[in-house]
Image (spheres, rainbow, N blue to C red):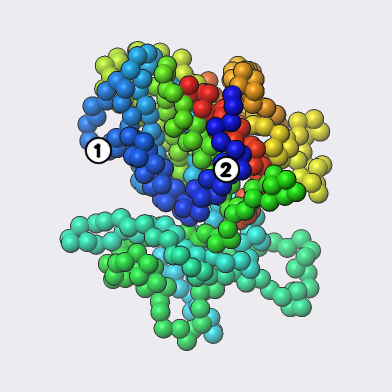
């Protein structure tokens, strides 16, 4: 398959998508807007559905998860699904956030996901998420992203902590509370948030607010081969799978794109891969098309899922952390992930299916397994399969510094996954 765009162009589009997605709510809103532009009709879970052959639809849950699907005019006797997640490790701001202590005002936060904590220190941070407000006697949701540096988490000078470079451990409640201002300041934190959202502070009833890094993404390297940015895990895969979904011809199967929340904290939420969200959507669309329960179960059994979540590249300074044989490299192609303990859903059949798809379209692949003495992480493939089981391959793009506030991956790899998903949805 010929590239649909240059890798450099694709990575610029990726960085634009990430910049517009400072929270999961913004990511889902952006994808939904792009789908609306492409002619998708929005459905609501609380309404009854009328699905038509040739129709394109999108439904969201809680504003932070999304399932889109396209029904072909003919066929549609099975599903092709690409799934990713839109959350990344960060800090969530607690209710009653201000801590006034001595000359400073800090924010009370808690960790979300398994982050590399030190990478959040000494860099410009801001706040994004959603507010639930009182509006004309009703509850309303407002997204907010403060466009300016609001916060910094300052490290301790080496002169004060001489052991800072020796096996340092971090306590979120003690070491990682962001600095908001001086105690002499006049503007409460929630007033700034309210002003940014164009609401009154007294009308804010609750919030889901998170920190985000304001360090911009960049393409760099001797041959512009690297892309570095916040949130590459997993917005790189979310972007590439979405681009492939919109470019694919969708002529044979019912094509489905799923974007889940809360993968970084286990997926066991109403909007995570461990929920009934995907299952409910598949069952409801099948019912609306007139399929019986038995026909729907048969369609699911004939289906296939690509679970896309980034993978670890061999580290330049610590190659010993990788498996001695299966050692993914940046720009080496799409990584197929295996795990004997079933952290990944890939098996011989699903790996062969995906590798064959890539070979037929001249897309390189490589293989990841953890070292046998390191259990490593997990992802959403098998979690989703506990609710709606089908052959699934867990894949990703090789990256460095996963769960840092600033990660590094390959420019070519984004284009490889776009091309693979485009072929998958053909």
Around disc 2, counting alpha carbons within 10 Å, would you say few (fewer than 14), some (14 to 19), or many (20 or more)?
A: few
Name the residue rendered at 40%, 31% in the picture. Answer: 278
Q: Is residue 322 left or right of residue 110?
A: right
User: Between 61 and 177, which is closer to the camera in this rendering?
Assistant: 61
Return the residue at label 2: 9
Return the residue at label 1: 46
User: Between 14 and 253, which is closer to the camera in this rendering?
Assistant: 14
Q: Is residue 111 visible?
A: no
Q: Relative to 148, is 299 above or below?
A: above
In the picture as drawn, the residue positioned furthest to the bottom comes out as 184
Q: Is residue 328 visible?
A: yes
Of badges 2 and 1, the one in the foreground is 2
Where residue 143 appears, as percent x and y from the top left, is: 36, 57
Q: Secondary structure at mark 2?
A: helix
Using the numbered discs, state the Cα–Cα distance from disc 2 to disc 1 in whole angstroms: 39 Å
Where residue 410 appears, as percent x and y from the top left, is: 66, 42
Around disc 1, counting alpha carbons within 10 Å, would you say few (fewer than 14), some (14 to 19), or many (20 or more)?
A: few
Name the residue rendered at 81%, 49% in the picture. Answer: 317
Where residue 40 appears, as percent x and y from the top left, is: 33, 34
């Amino acid at each position: 398959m010929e590239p649909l765009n240059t890798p450099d162009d694709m990575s610029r589009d990726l960085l634009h998508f990430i910049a517009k997605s400072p929270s999961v709510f913004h990511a889902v809103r952006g994808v939904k807007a792009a789908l609306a532009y492409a002619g998708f009709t929005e459905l609501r879970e609380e309404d009854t559905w009328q699905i038509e052959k040739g129709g394109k639809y999108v439904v969201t849950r809680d504003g932070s998860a999304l399932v889109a699907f396209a029904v072909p005019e003919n066929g549609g006797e099975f599903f092709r699904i690409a799934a990713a997640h839109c959350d990344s490790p960060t800090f969530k701001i607690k209710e009653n956030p201000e801590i006034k202590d001595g000359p400073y005002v800090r924010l009370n936060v808690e960790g979300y996901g398994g982050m590399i904590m030190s990478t959040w220190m000494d860099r410009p941070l801001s706040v994004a998420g959603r507010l639930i407000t009182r509006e004309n006697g009703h509850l309303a949701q407002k997204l907010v992203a403060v466009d300016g540096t609001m916060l910094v988490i300052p490290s301790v000078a080496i002169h004060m902590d001489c052991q800072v470079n020796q096996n340092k451990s971090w306590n979120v409640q003690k070491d990682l509370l962001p600095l908001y201002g001086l105690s002499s300041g006049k503007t409460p934190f929630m007033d700034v948030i309210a002003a940014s959202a164009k609401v009154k502070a007294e009308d804010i009833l609750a919030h889901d607010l998170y920190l985000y890094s304001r360090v911009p993404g960049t393409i760099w390297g001797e041959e512009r081969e690297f892309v570095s940015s916040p949130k590459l895990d997993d917005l790189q895969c979310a972007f590439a799978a979405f681009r492939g979904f919109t470019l694919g011809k969708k002529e044979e199967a019912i094509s489905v794109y799923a974007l889940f929340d809360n993968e970084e904290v286990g997926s066991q939420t109403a909007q995570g891969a461990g929920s009934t969200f995907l299952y409910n959507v598949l069952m409801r669309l099948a019912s609306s098309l007139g399929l019986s329960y038995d026909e729907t179960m048969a369609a699911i059994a004939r289906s296939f899922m690509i679970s896309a979540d980034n993978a670890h590249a061999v580290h330049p300074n610590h190659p010993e952390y990788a498996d001695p044989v299966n050692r993914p490299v940046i720009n080496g192609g799409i990584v197929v992930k295996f795990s004997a303990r079933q952290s990944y859903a890939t098996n011989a059949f699903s790996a062969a299916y995906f590798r064959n798809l890539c070979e037929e379209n001249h897309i390189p692949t490589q293989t990841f397994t953890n070292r046998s003495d390191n259990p490593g992480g997990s992802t959403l493939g098998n979690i989703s399969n506990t609710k709606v089981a089908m052959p699934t391959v867990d894949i990703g793009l090789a990256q460095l510094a996963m769960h840092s506030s600033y990660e590094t991956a390959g420019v070519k790899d984004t284009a490889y996954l776009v091309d693979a998903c485009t072929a998958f949805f053909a």
